Image: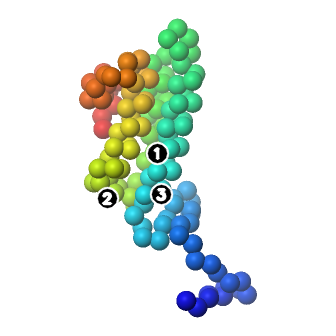
């Protein structure tokens, strides 16, 4: 493969690049972008949960509000370009996992509670 020169600089071929917060990979399958966004959202949910206890901290209503106002938009950033990827079961499971963690902490339920029940209790639909 020949080297491409741009303003006397040789350009190197990379597998992925981040542009405006969107991770573009060479095959445009969006796996790296979705993985990064889900991991960032999970981290944010856990940080939010550290501020909430059974008898202290934010109320479940405030946690619900923070999830819908801050974490969901973080997760769905640039969904216009990667929304077709949601048809794959792995991506669907990743997104459900983030929502399940948030629902557990909003409802204060035990971890064996079914996800569908949590979504009804908290008012968060998938």
- Residue at (42% x, 22% y) in the render: 106
Gap between marks 2 and 3 measured at Cα:
15 Å
Residue 123 pos. (x, y %): 32, 27
Gap between marks 1 and 2 measured at Cα:
16 Å
Taking the image as shown, residue 122 lies to the left or right of residue 69, namely: left
- Residue at (53% x, 67% y) in the render: 16
Please rate how many residues cluster around mark 1, counting C-alpha atoms within 10 Å: few if below 14, some from 14 to 19, many from 20.
Answer: many
- Residue at (51% x, 59% y) in the render: 22
Taking the image as shown, residue 98 lies to the left or right of residue 49, namely: left
Foreground tag (1 vs 2): 1
In the picture of the structure, the residue carrying the numbered disc 3 is 32
Q: Earlier in the sequence, mark 1 or mark 2?
A: 1
- Nearer the observer, 87 or 125: 87
Is any part of residue 78 visible from this angle?
no
Q: Secondary structure at mark 3?
A: helix
Q: Earlier in the sequence, mark 2 or mark 3?
A: 3
Q: Earlier in the sequence, mark 1 or mark 3?
A: 3
Gap between marks 1 and 3 measured at Cα:
10 Å
**Vertical placement of 30 versus 90: above or below?**
below
Query: Within the image, what quadrant is residue 102 found in?
Result: top left
Give yes or no for contact between labels 1 and 3 (Cβ–Cβ under 8 Å): no
Q: Secondary structure at mark 2?
A: helix
Residue 71 pos. (x, y %): 48, 38
Please rate how many residues cluster around mark 2, counting C-alpha atoms within 10 Å: few if below 14, some from 14 to 19, many from 20.
Answer: few
Give the colour scheme of this rendering.
rainbow
Residue 56 pos. (x, y %): 56, 11
Residue 94 pos. (x, y %): 38, 44
Is any part of residue 26 visible from this angle?
yes
- Nearer the observer, 11 or 122: 11
In the picture of the structure, the residue carrying the numbered disc 1 is 38
In the picture of the structure, the residue carrying the numbered disc 2 is 84
Give yes or no for contact between labels 1 and 2 (Cβ–Cβ under 8 Å): no
């Amino acid at each position: 493969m020949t080297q491409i020169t741009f303003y006397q600089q040789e350009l190197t071929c990379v597998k992925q690049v981040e542009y405006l917060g969107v991770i573009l990979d060479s095959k445009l399958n969006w796996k790296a972008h979705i993985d990064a966004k889900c991991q960032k959202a999970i981290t944010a949910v856990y940080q939010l949960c550290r501020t909430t206890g059974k008898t202290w901290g934010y109320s479940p209503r405030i946690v619900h509000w923070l999830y819908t106002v801050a974490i969901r938009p973080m997760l769905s950033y640039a969904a216009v370009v990667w929304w077709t990827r949601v048809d794959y079961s792995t991506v669907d499971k990743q997104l459900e996992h983030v929502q399940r963690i948030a629902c557990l902490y909003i409802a204060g339920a035990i971890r064996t509670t079914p996800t569908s029940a949590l979504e009804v209790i908290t008012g968060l639909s998938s």
